[in-house]
Image (spheres, rainbow, N blue to C red):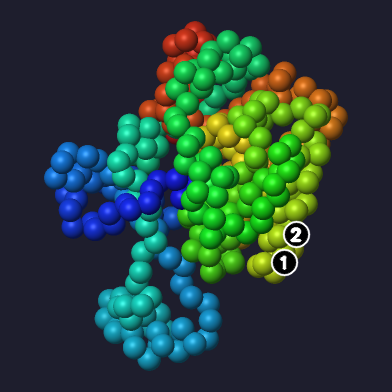
């Protein structure tokens, strides 16, 4: 996710909101997603993530010297403790989406997940029309590409209208901890929604984007390409082609099989067969409240294509 959840002049005073409900909690990722409402009845989603622990010696010297310790129990050489860290190490990274809509609420809610096998016929007959009819505004993204927003965050910028792209940090990353590195490349072309639109014509774009992004990451952050994973989502959160680059040590949601397609594999597939993604059956995980789920359950009349994940 880039910075499209906010706008210039966004009031960040959280005291004006009242708590509505916890949409989802992820103990493994140390994340919490909360629904809020302001006095005017406008709703907001607050995404909270605990920042990673520091790894530098200076920070740990401060932690060891200033942390309050409460003993829970002790057995032989093992002690269970509750640590109250100094305030500067207790911050929470957050994203505020305001005003939010039903899509935002659904995206961050706890819900059942299903595995779907989408044939090319299903995509062109049912899924593509649904996408075209229900595509949210991409103005936030165009503002980024036109330097109206987030220009200070640009890592690399290729302005070629056909093969150009912009590389920026994702909001999930604090910009400091390289073990959690997460950046995205947004292509400048507006005619590629997802991998379904890719063919042999796009190989120069994809290889240029891959190679220049790896070079920019290596130059700015010191990570080589074998320390970085490049992939695309299917289906993506928004239908303007973009590529995710994350540190291989970062196990972020959406980087696993069922959501992520490795960029090198995508390139190789269309090198072998130009129209691979216009013909292929693609499997992916979808959430129950995703509007696409209804397409597969009703409009496609193909219940066998949907399998619940338990």
Q: Do callouts 1 and 2 mark residues in contact (Cβ within 8 Å)?
A: yes
Can you say whether 213 is above or below 89 in the image?
above
Q: Residue 84: which quarter of the image? A: bottom left
Give 255 or 160, whichever is nearer the viewer: 160
Give 283 or 73, whichever is nearer the viewer: 283
Which mark is on residue 215? 2
Percent coordinates x, y for residue 171 in the rendering: 48, 54
Give 46 or 122, whichever is nearer the viewer: 46
Q: Quadrant of the C terminus?
A: top left
Numbered disc total:
2
Could you tell me which secondary element the residue under label 1 belongs to?
A: helix
| Image point (46%, 67%), residue name | 52
Percent coordinates x, y for residue 152 in the rendering: 53, 60
223 relative to 105 in the view: left or right: right
Which mark is on residue 38? none
Report the residue that reaches farthest toward the left.
Answer: 39
| Label 2 Cα crowd, 10 Å radius (few <14 / some 14-19 / many 20+) | some
State the residue position of label 1: 219
| Image point (18%, 57%), residue name | 15
Whether residue 120 is visible here, answered yes or no, is: yes
Mark 1 and mark 2: span between their CA atoms? 6 Å
Could you tell me which secondary element the residue under label 2 belongs to?
A: helix
Percent coordinates x, y for residue 212 in the rendering: 75, 53
Q: Residue 201: which quarter of the image? A: top right
| Image point (31%, 78%), residue name | 87
Percent coordinates x, y for residue 103 in the rendering: 37, 32
183 relative to 41 in the view: left or right: right
| Label 1 Cα crowd, 10 Å radius (few <14 / some 14-19 / many 20+) | few
| Image point (49%, 8%), residue name | 301
Can you say whether 268 is above or below 46 in the image?
above
Q: Residue 168: which quarter of the image? A: bottom right
220 relative to 286 in the view: left or right: right
């Amino acid at each position: 996710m880039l910075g499209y959840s906010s706008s210039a002049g966004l009031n960040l005073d959280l005291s004006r909101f009242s708590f509505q409900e916890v949409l989802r909690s992820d103990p493994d990722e140390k994340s919490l997603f909360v629904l809020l409402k302001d006095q005017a009845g406008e709703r907001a989603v607050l995404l909270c993530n605990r920042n990673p622990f520091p790894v530098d010696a200076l920070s740990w010297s401060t932690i060891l010297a200033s942390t309050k310790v409460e003993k829970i129990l002790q057995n032989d050489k093992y002690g269970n403790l509750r640590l109250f860290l100094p305030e500067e190490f207790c911050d929470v990274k957050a994203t505020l989406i305001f005003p939010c809509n039903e899509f935002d609420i659904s995206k961050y809610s706890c819900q059942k997940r299903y595995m779907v096998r989408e044939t090319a016929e299903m995509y062109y007959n049912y899924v593509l029309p649904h996408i075209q009819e229900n595509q949210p505004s991409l103005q936030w993204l165009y503002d980024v590409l036109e330097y109206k927003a987030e220009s200070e965050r640009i890592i690399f910028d290729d302005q070629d209208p056909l093969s150009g792209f912009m590389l920026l940090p994702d909001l999930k990353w604090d910009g400091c901890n390289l073990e959690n590195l997460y950046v995205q490349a947004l292509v400048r072309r507006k005619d590629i929604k997802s991998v379904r639109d890719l063919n042999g014509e796009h190989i120069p774009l994809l290889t240029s984007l891959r190679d220049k992004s790896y070079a920019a990451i290596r130059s700015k952050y010191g990570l080589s390409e074998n320390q970085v994973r490049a992939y695309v989502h299917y289906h993506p959160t928004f239908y303007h082609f973009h590529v995710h680059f994350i540190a291989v040590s970062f196990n972020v949601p959406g980087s696993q099989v069922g959501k992520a397609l490795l960029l090198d594999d995508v390139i190789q597939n269309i090198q072998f067969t130009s129209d691979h993604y216009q013909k292929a059956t693609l499997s992916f995980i979808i959430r129950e409240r995703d509007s696409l789920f209804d397409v597969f359950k009703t409009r496609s009349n193909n219940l066998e294509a949907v399998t619940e994940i338990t």
